[in-house]
Image (cartoon, rainbow, N blue to C red):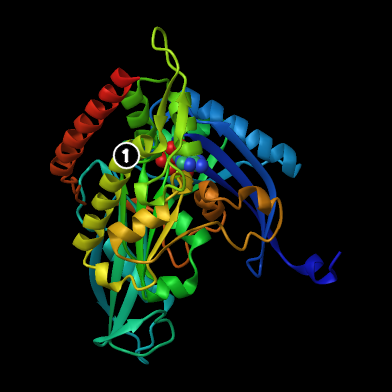
Amino acid sequence: MDRNNITMKKNIVTGLDLGTTKVCAVIAEISENDSINILGFGIAPSEGMNKGLVSNIGKTAEAIKEAVKIASNRAGLEVTTLNVGVAGEHITSIRHRNYVTINNEENEITKADLDRLEADVRTIRIPSDKQILHIIPEEFTIDFQGGIENPIGMSGSRLEATNHIVLASIPAISNIKKSVERAGFHVNDYILQPLASSSSVLEESEKDLGVALIDIGGGTTDIAIFHNKSIKHSKVIGIAGNQVTNDVRESLGIVTDEAEKLKKDYGYATENSIIKDEDILIRGVGARGNSKIPVSLLTQIISLRMRELFSLIDNDIRNSGYKNKIKAGIVLTGGGSLLKGCIELAEEVFGLPARIGVPQDLGSGLSNEIESPEFATVAGLIRGIPGEKSSEFIPEVVKTKKQKEKNTTNNKMTDIFTKIKVFFDEL
Ligand SMILES: Nc1ncnc2c1ncn2[C@@H]1O[C@H](COP(=O)(O)OP(=O)(O)OP(=O)(O)O)[C@@H](O)[C@H]1O
Ligand SMILES: [Mg+2]
């Protein structure tokens, strides 16, 4: 054993990702120098979550119990408190500026001044059903000189902060709390899922240059934009991998498991990525026997929804005002990013370079088991949010204007249904 490690303080942290398709828990040992040792990892199917929201407390509690139990057994230790990820379309973010005057004799900025700024943010009026999930300082300005990362110890008479404030629905958070407590644990911290994913898959240089992280899960797609090292925008969209599977299921008249398998084994996000347009076997249900369709037809179904999703994200990025600032491009993560052809479609729709984000710097232990995009969130939950000041109250729900795009997709879906019908009739 390394003798230096004997004196080093270590913390045990447990991350819990309540996904729409899976609940997973990671127990890690974090050293004083921030190095990570993954001690335990457990996963359980998720049946009580829908689009980032708890839809069944009992089922979610059971999945939490199972995932944490597996992780605990492997780690050989009991845990009681968990860092839990939060997502869902109820999440909104706002940018807020405020300032305080510096009163002490030397005009030196102290931690107490930052606390006053934060206390002031907490007095903002917000809808009664919302709470502040995160207050993340983007930058500080001292006497009108901007771009300051850490003002403590600097001199000035007026300290201004620009904060990225994330709001969440109180009932949504409360249902997560109830599920965790029913499973026999306590919540240590609630962390926005895209923030967690970003801390595990993004390079500091990408955050500095400008990057958009897109986590495509089963029920939700989470977006986070970083520039000059700090978060500038975050958003959660209720379209993701499950909807793609559902389109395949409905279009081909097959069961969900078969649709999921076809998507993963043969599907592409865009027809341009198809390597070989072979016929694939489809197992029919009931009176409809087995049949065959070409990969290109399956891909047309998948591609429509993926294009709709990427177009919605592109609109959101444009509306955020950061489209021309994301010089490092797009990083795709989450299980949905494992769909073949995702990078090609992203590069086409966003007009930017794209890569797949896999959790990095997980140190020793069981790290190889979570080095996959599906585990980007849970890998981030064990790190917490750098520079963040925790929760309580705040405003505004921005509804997505999806109807127009939805109608276009529905029309195209009808075309594909017609094609499929002709295809089956011709067999
Ligand atoms: N190889 C693959 N090809 C295509 N899609 C895949 C592949 N592997 C997983 N997926 C899709 O990824 C999705 C699940 O992703 P993930 O595990 O990140 O979701 P989650 O965290 O449970 O859900 P959410 O974050 O939305 O609450 C499913 O829709 C699944 O079909
Ligand atoms: Mg997820």
Give the quadrant of residue 177.
Answer: top left
Give the quadrant of residue 425.
Answer: top left
Residue 370 drawn at (x, y percent):
61, 49
Q: Quick check: 369 above or below 59?
A: below
Q: Quick check: 246 above or below 128?
A: above
Which residue type does callout 1 highlight? Gln
Question: Which residue is labeled 1 in the image?
Answer: 300
Q: Quick check: 361 above or below 46?
A: below
Residue 403 drawn at (x, y percent):
14, 40
Classify residue 160 as left or right of residue 368.
Answer: left
Residue 419 drawn at (x, y percent):
25, 29
Is residue 143 in sight in this rendering?
yes
- Mark 1 CB within 8 Å of ligand 1: no
Residue 18 drawn at (x, y percent):
48, 39
Give the quadrant of residue 316.
Answer: bottom left
Q: Which residue is outermost to the front? A: 426
Classify the position of the N terminus by image quarter.
Answer: bottom right
Ligand 2 occupies quarter: top left
User: Which is nearer the eye, 251 or 74?
Assistant: 251
